[in-house]
Amino acid sequence: MAEKIAQGDEAAAIAAAVARFEAEMAPAAEPPVAVDPWQRAALVEGVGAKETIHDPQGGAGWLS
């Protein structure tokens, strides 16, 4: 039994169908999360909201 080989328009349709399938089934890329420079500095320094910060000079503390 002879096999049929896709040619021309058929091959293009198959390639397009495969490309569409791959695009639809690919995992969604998560956009990068923009971090505010002030928030980044707080994260690097380890400062949290509602944290009591003490003055290293021996003065009173305050809430951040």
Image (tube, grey):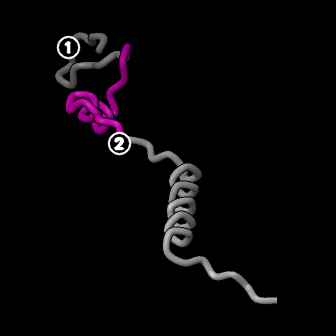
> Which element carries disc 2, helix, strand or loop?
loop
In the current view of this chain or complex, which residue is farthest to the left? 57
Report how far apart the C-alphas of labels 1 and 2 lie in the structure: 41 Å
Q: Please tell me which of labels 1 and 2 falls first in the chain.
A: 2
Depth check, mark 1 against mark 2: the one in front is 2
Q: Which residue is mark 2?
A: 32
Rendering coords of residue 27 (x, y %): 54, 50
> Which element carries disc 1, helix, strand or loop?
loop
Q: Is residue 45 magenta?
A: yes
Quarter of the picture containing the N terminus is: bottom right
Q: Which residue is mark 1?
A: 59
Label 1: few (<14), some (14–19) or many (≥20) C-alpha neighbours in 10 Å: few
Rendering coords of residue 45 (x, y %): 28, 35
Q: Amino acid at mark 1?
A: Gly
Horizontal side, residue 13 vs residue 62: left or right:
right
Give the residues in magenta. 32-50
Q: Is residue 28 magenta?
A: no
- Residue 53 is drawn in which quadrant? top left
Q: Nearer the viewer, residue 22 or 10?
A: 10
Q: Nearer the viewer, residue 55 or 49?
A: 49
Q: Amino acid at mark 2?
A: Pro
Rendering coords of residue 3 (x, y %): 73, 85
Rendering coords of residue 48 (x, y %): 36, 23
Q: Are marks 1 and 2 in contact (CB under 8 Å)?
A: no
The residue shown at (27%, 10%) is: 62
The residue shown at (50%, 69%) is: 9
Label 2: few (<14), some (14–19) or many (≥20) C-alpha neighbours in 10 Å: few
In the rendered image, the vertical position of residue 4 relative to residue 28, given as above or below:
below
Horizontal side, residue 64 vs residue 8: left or right:
left
The residue shown at (55%, 58%) is: 22
